Image (cartoon, helix red, strand yellow):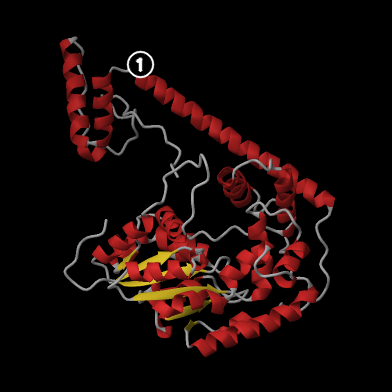
Amino acid sequence: MAVVSGGPPPTVYLHIGAPKSGTTFLQGLLWKNAEALSEAGVFLPGGSFGAQVRATRDLRGLEPEPDEPGPGWDGSWDLLAGEVKASRHRVAVFSHEVLCAVDAEGAERAVRSLAPCEVHIVYSARALHGLLPSEWQEYVKHRFHYDFEHWLREVIDGPRDAGAAEWFWRVHDIPEVLGRWAPHVPPERVHVLTMPGPGAPRERLWERFAGLVGVDPAVADPAGARANASLSWTETELLRKVNGAVDEDAPMWLYHRLVTDLLALQVLPGLGEPGRVPLPPGRHGWAADKARELTAAIRSAGYHVVGDLSELLTAEPLGAEEPATPPADAELLDAAAHTIVGLLDRVSALRREVGKLRNEQREQRETALPKLMARRLSERNETVWRLRVGYWHLVERLKGIEVPPEPAPEAQGETAGETAGRPPRPVLSPRAPTR
């Protein structure tokens, strides 16, 4: 929880995106190490990534779908802005990859709501040769069911305000995106963070980000940070076929929970034949020309570059000009079979969890409320537990049963149920995490 400070307000770094440029890795690392970062003076407002997602939706003016479960987000941005201004930390970091999709009015509101804090804008950028295939995969994870060639025609050859091109350029046209923020933040406080090329250690991106916000990279351990699950070409094609079979009337929030979050992010990765989706050879020249155009615009605007703009010009490795062959039906069938087995494993685990919860619920119904409350309290408080054991001993002695003495404190490393003279301590069944 933010604490009111008598000192100056924190410097705010709004990490606005872009999608598919290492943002998931950075966000996972930030939240996994939130406590250590807080001790180092870095505040993550909202208390969770979900809270920052809701604040971004509020800033963008989005409306919930009908019957969409979960909390709403009206007023979420102003709530987080208030937390930031009341914080006693040196730095505050807000990171969500689609913050770069806000319009000019949303950008102005964001900066104004954080006054008198000094606001910095951080935009992660990635070379187009890797970005284009990765973005097509992301579209497929969000219900798109056209192949890569069709998607490329919409993005590159079609009008920029229609089809897949509308969203792609809204978040990846660097001069346009940063131009919506530039009127409210001086250019030296607009930072373009380049994503290291293939083969570079992934912690390099964190080292650059940490250096920008003024924190020792060693404060956070990148080993356990989650990166966005990448699908092979086979897995992407299988997911595309699933999208074609999904009922068109199914709401997007339900699709995201079942297909995006479960199938695409948890079950599918690693089940299909390995092999990334390649950019077709005929598109390499366009990608190289566009990358030079974007980097020139960054230089001319005077934005601060964290990393090296040459990383945005990186071409495909040798041999990439060779035509790639889409996965065959046999490969898709094999991946589908393994996917079914993975889903059955999930169903089995959920059935076990439901069984545990039902047993606990039945136990609660059959146990008198005072006894249940005493049991629950004793599981969380050592003093209450000892009082409960003492009461049990007294009852046994009144029955004429001699109870062995409590073991010495140094002998209490035994497991519950094995310690002489003490009933096994009840253990709560694990509950499924709430989103």
Question: Is 129 left, or right, of 215 in this rendering?
Answer: right
Name the residue located 17 percent from the left edge and 24 percent from the top edge. Answer: 390
Q: Compared with residue 212, is residue 383 higher up or lower down, i.e. above or below?
A: above
Question: Is 348 left, or right, of 15 in this rendering?
Answer: right
Residue 220 in sight here: no
Question: Is 316 left, or right, of 356 in this rendering?
Answer: right
Q: Compared with residue 42, is residue 410 higher up or lower down, i.e. above or below?
A: above
Out of 394 and 285, give the one closest to the viewer. 285
Q: Compared with residue 122, is residue 85 higher up or lower down, i.e. above or below?
A: above
Quarter the N terminus occupies: bottom left
Name the residue located 44 percent from the left edge and 28 percent from the top edge. Answer: 357
On the image, the x and y values in percent for residue 418 come to: 34, 29
Out of 22 and 32, give the one closest to the viewer. 22
**Mark 1 is on which residue type?**
Glu
| Mark 1 residue element | helix
Question: How many labels were placed on the picture?
Answer: 1
Out of 390 and 202, give the one closest to the viewer. 202
Residue 52 in sight here: yes
Quarter the C terminus occupies: top left
Name the residue located 43 percent from the left edge and 60 percent from the top edge. Answer: 59
- Label 1: how many residues lie within 10 Å, few (<14), some (14-19) or many (20+)? few
The residue beneath circle 1 is 366
Name the residue located 50 percent from the left edge and 87 percent from the top edge. Answer: 301
On the image, the x and y values in percent for residue 91 come to: 31, 71
On the image, the x and y values in percent for residue 429 come to: 41, 32
Out of 53 and 328, give the one closest to the viewer. 53
On the image, the x and y values in percent for residue 163 come to: 68, 62
